Image (tube, rainbow, N blue to C red):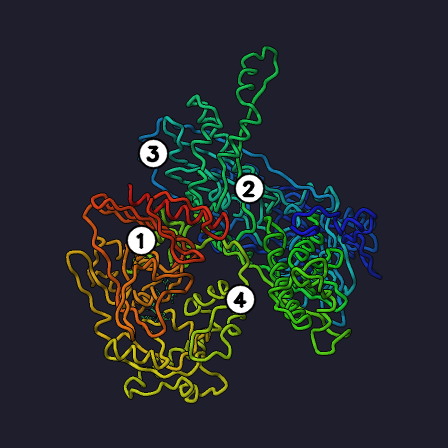
Amino acid sequence: MTQKGVGARLPRKEDARFLRGQGEYVANLRFPGMLDVAFVRSPMAHARIRGIKKLPGVFTADDLKGVRPIRADSSLKGFKSSEQPILATGKVRQVGELVAMCVAPTRAEAEDLADQVELDLEELPAVVDMLAARTRPPALVHEHWGDNIFLESLVDDDLTEVKRSAAVCVKRTIRTARQHMSPLEGRGVVCEWNLRQGQLLVHTAAQMPHINRAGLAECLGLDQGSIRVIAPDVGGGFGYKGILLPEEVALAWLCRQLGKPVRWIEDRREQLSAGANCREHDYDITVYADRGGRLLGIDCEATVDSGAYSSYPFSACLEAAQVSSILPGPYKMERYRCRTWSVATNKAPILPYRGVARTGVCFALELMLDAVARELKMEPHELRLANLVQPGEMPFDNITKKHFDSGDYPEAVRRAARLIDVEKYRKRQKQQTDHRRVGVGFAIYCEQAAHGTSVYYGWGIPMVPGHEQCTARLTPDGVLELRIGAHSHGQGMETTMAQVANTVLGVDPGNVRLVHGDTGLTPYSTGTWGSRSMVMSGGAVASACDIIASRVKAIASKLLEVSSQDLILENELVKVRGTDRALSLTAAARRRRPGGAGGDGGLQSEGRHRHLQLCLPCSCGRGGYRDRWGRNPRLCDRRGRRHAREPDDRRGPDLRRRRAGRGHCALRRDAVRRAGPAARHHARRLPAAGRDRGARDAPRAPGDAFALHALRAEGHRRGRRDRAAGRDRERGQRRARAARRRDHRVAAHAAAHRRSDPGKEMKSQAFDYARPKDVPEAIKLLEQGGKAAAGTQSLGPMLNLRVVQPSLLVDLRFIPELKACSENGESIVLGACVTHAQIEDGKVPDPTGGFMREVASNIAYRAVRNRGTLGGSLVHADPAGDWPSALTLLGATALIAGTKGKRELPVERFLKGVFETDLGENELLVGVRIPKRSKAARFGYWKFCRKAGEFPQAIGGALTDPERKETRAVVGALQAAPKLFSALNPDLTGIGRDAYDRQLHRVALQRAVARVIS
Ligand SMILES: Cc1cc2nc3c(=O)[nH]c(=O)nc-3n(C[C@H](O)[C@H](O)[C@H](O)COP(=O)(O)OP(=O)(O)OC[C@H]3O[C@@H](n4cnc5c(N)ncnc54)[C@H](O)[C@@H]3O)c2cc1C
């Protein structure tokens, strides 16, 4: 922690103006000729509009020609759209709904005008109770729906067995009341028309300026660029300012209509009577447990009162989606079924109040746990301890696939019980003789933060929240300007973002200027909500500052004539480590161009933070969303079996699809991205690492660990932008085939010449190609500077990125010896060019009774397995590769041939480090010998992958052979070669990059061991 960086306690920068009353809120804005607006609102919950007596200065729905109603749809199947009119049309559906807009020079006059508007309303039966609305509706809120249900969803499971075997079954109905949030500053909007730019300027007290802009553009039929939304200082949000208001649309239209600035400032009466509410839930829950208090299953039917309309952009099923996906929380259970209804009533719509639905859900579940504890005569906290995920089980995907990456929940309960001294209270309760009641209550909740895109996609909400950007500029005068799209409405982000910059760049927080809350000046953002700003925008700020830091160091390293690795950034200085030599940040920023003192643009960068979020929650609704493998997670039970409703077209022979969700593949689901990607700038470092190098492998620079990610990602899930390059590569291969026929030089550059687009060239350096017929010939070609090529699955990306630039490629795949397999009583030998697919398909002997087949089948995807080879994997020595770990576990021996003859080496000695083996320059790996084990031998293997088909983050392997008294364990995917142990519970201290990484490896090993001893 730096003195002023993240975690330090600083006076908030923004407080200097807030405490002096110098904050600038929407209500403080004054523009020449500005008019005030007051609204005529519905006094009834449900009524037909028979007539409105208008006066000059009063506008009704008939006037708003071409303005579209607010529509917040969910893409979930079965969702019914509501259209929230800007001014009521036909009928009113809630108290406070806008009916007419009155404009006058002052608010008082506008209100007088509103008083004179006469409404002729025919009252209709109001839909007030959500259960009645669903089951026996007194009326329909939206007649054309035929019922009052926005969306019905089901997370299904079979509880028959649980019902039969449960010792306890507790059933309760729980209701929570509607809640309303009330920030100090209400909502308000001021619109002005900028003639010069032809742009509508909307100043509004909002949490999500860019989203408001999108909604306004949709309703007004304008392009987004013609609207600029500015959210100045905002006095509290809590979700209340996280939706698009009809008032905003109405004023935007009025401003364009009149060509004058207009404003509306919400008063407290409007806020309390007409503003959106939340959290009105009804739960019908049954919990099943065994005699020891272990939860067996939960069956829940939940109804959420969603009010009259779906709020933009979150939609009316937001809370119900939360209910079904977060109800199980950090508890373990066998079965879970949850049906939800988002119901329309004649009340204000719902919005994303902080911790959306969390309190109601938590209240319901924890009450149920108390009830189960009472039934079993257990201490409530003991019951919780019996069901919480244990630290050793982390990372943990709960039954709705919510991912818990770390934490010790039981310890939190134990500590609370200790501090409360539960025993003492029990005694006191027994002794209490007067009317007073003394109680102890326990409740746990785990809040989600910084939702990733997958969560919102799963809920059918058309937002991409897992992404934030920052533009940073270090100006020549030493001030750092940060532009972010998130918005601060009381969180003190001007200070916290400056602290992030201080931590990365050493710039004083006083010299950081945060620009936010203005779509005209900041990068696109989905705004501030869901505890996302510090993770997402903070991550983007760190990433942008990181880029500037590396540029500053590069400049300083030239000026100070030292390596940039010896430089540190501290207190506005770039210092040479261990000396008193330093350069100010300002000086570095000014020296951007030769002789550029003053007048220069400083240093600018763009950083971004992406958050994919691993949990693919079961979520609500049916159909619609499918994950990356085409599976619909909602239709799978917790073991990933397909639900009977899964349509037939998804039942193809695609093995991966069927397998996803089970065993290793269950672990291949997206993992929470723990740090920002910055993949692009890592990738940018790569060419530099390999530039100007000859035919030999480029030595790896420190920090290449980052580059490896890009390298591994090369040939895989390439973005659209890479297509041309991809075609280039294919061409290269075609050329290579042609060349094989002619048996001479492959002109990769010739391929480029043949192309119609001469501006683009192949990615790899030109190389010769040879196809030796046996091992001695291959070795000879290596002596001539050749580079061995097997499946080219790893070599291809290295060539593309020019990490290697061989002048000759020696294709080993046609050497019979390297594809041969042999077997004797003790061992088998597999040739180096045996492919993963051959092992997977059982086409070569497997001395491990299927273990090797299983390992092979979980490498990447079939296309990679078809070409990738056992030998290539081992020689490439990617620490995250499967064979380095698996062959180390199996006690395999590498068989090597070279100019000096043949030699053998145990795999654990063959692998020397990250991408490093004992293989000499002119040596080939010819094959691998794997010892046979007794019939009693058991093998276990487990790996955690961030995404299906990608290299794992952690590998664990275990082997026991009781007859031969042999026990081996391996931990792989380290920043080193795999580590071999001779016990199943080795000491893993010091393993992994940090505590999280260590835990991943620990769990991978435990799971591998569990397979051996189960
Ligand atoms: C998208 C993608 C995902 C992947 N995911 C995984 C995964 O999850 N797990 C995993 O284990 N692997 C994974 N891989 C890697 C894959 O297993 C490759 O097959 C393997 O890394 C290299 O094998 P190869 O035959 O393609 O070797 P090549 O790419 O041809 O060669 C790799 C290196 O080994 C050298 N070499 C090859 N054979 C010999 C030999 N006989 N003697 C001397 N040197 C030799 C080459 O010169 C080169 O330096 C993935 C690859 C891709 C493209």
Mark 4 within 8 Å of ligand 1, using the beta carbon: no
Identify the mark nearer the N-term, 3 or 1. 3
Per the image, label 4 sits on a secondary structure element best described as helix
Q: CA distance from mark 4 to mark 1?
A: 33 Å
Q: Nearer the viewer, residue 30 or 821?
A: 821
Per the image, label 1 sits on a secondary structure element best described as helix
Q: Which residue is mark 2?
A: 357
Identify the mark nearer the N-term, 2 or 3. 3
Q: Position of residue 198 (x, y in %)?
A: 72, 70
The quadrant where residue 779 appears: bottom left
Circle 1/circle 2 CB separation < 8 Å: no
Ligand 1, seen in the image, is in the quarter at bottom left
Q: Nearer the viewer, residue 854 or 303?
A: 854
Identify the mark nearer the N-term, 1 or 2. 2
Circle 4/circle 1 CB separation < 8 Å: no
Q: Nearer the viewer, residue 122 or 900?
A: 900
User: Label 3 is placed on what type of residue?
Assistant: Val
Which is closer to the viewer, label 4 or label 1?
1
Q: Is residue 166 above or below residue 471?
A: above
